[in-house]
Image (cartoon, rainbow, N blue to C red):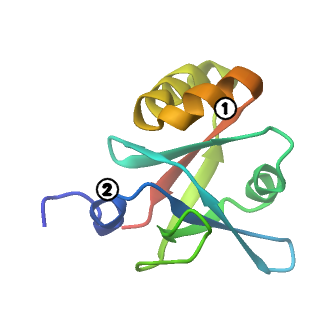
Amino acid sequence: MNGRPQALSEIGNAKCISLTTFKRDGTKVSTPIWFNVIGEKIYVTTEPGAWKVKRIANNPSVEFAVCTQRGKVAGKTFGGTARILAPAELASVIAAKKRRYASFRLIHLFKKDQVAIEITPNL
C-alpha cells in the first residue's frame, strides 16, 4: 500500500460514493453523492437543510463506499467521522468540486447555498 488509508485508495477514481449517516435510533440512511479527496480527507457538499447535515450534527459517525450514480454500492464499505465545515472553509471545497465535476459548475449557478462536510476515514 502507498501509505494512504485503504478507503482513499479504494474510492480514488470513483465518481460517486454512497454516504451513509445514522438517525437517532441507529437506522442507516444512504445517499449517493459526488466527492473530492483532498489530502487524507473526503469532502462533499450539500444544501444546508439536508437531512444528512442534521444527522451528522447528531452523530458524526458515517460509512461510505463506491457506488453508481443511482446509489448501488459497488465496493467495500468504510467507516469514518464527519464534521460540518465552517462557512470560511467552503470556498476551497466548492472550487475542487467545480474542477472535478463539469455538471456541478452549472448546478452551482442555481444552488449557491451549500455546506461542506469533511469525512476522516477510520484507519
Q: Residues within 10 Å of mark 1 (few under 14, many from 20)?
A: few
Q: Is residue 68 left or right of residue 11?
A: right
Disc 1 secondary structure class: helix
Name the amino acid type tagged 1: Ile
Residue 66 in the image: above or below residue 116: below
Q: CA distance from mark 2 to mark 1?
A: 23 Å
- Taking the image as drawn, is residue 31 in sight? yes
Q: Dividing the image into 4 quarters, which one contains the N terminus?
A: bottom left
Report whether 65 appears left or right of 91.
left
Residue 4 horizontal/vertical position (percent)? 23, 57
Give the quarter of the image for residue 51. Answer: bottom right
Q: Which residue is mark 2?
A: 12
Q: Residue at x 62, y 68 (%)?
A: 70
Q: Residue at x 31, y 56 (%)?
A: 13
Rendering quarter of residue 121: bottom left
Q: Nearer the viewer, mark 2 or mark 1?
A: 1
Q: Where is residue 103? Give x, y as percent.
A: 55, 36
Position of 123 relative to 58 (above/below):
below
Q: Between 7 and 109, which is closer to the camera in this rendering?
A: 109
Quarter of the image for residue 31 reads bottom right
Q: Secondary structure at mark 2?
A: loop
| Neighbour tally class for label 2: few under 14, some 14-19, many 20 plus, Cα within 10 Å | some
Q: In this view of the protein, can residue 112 be seen by the observer? A: no
The x and y percentages for residue 32 are: 62, 62
Q: Position of residue 83 (x, y in %)?
A: 63, 47
Image quarter hosting the C terminus: bottom left
Q: Nearer the viewer, residue 41 or 72?
A: 72
Give me the disc on residue 64. Answer: none
Instruction: Give the label on residue 107, or none.
Output: 1
Residue at 32% across, 41% down: 39
Question: Measured along the vertical axis of the image, is residue 22 above or below residue 12?
Answer: below
Comparing 80 with 64, the one in front is 64
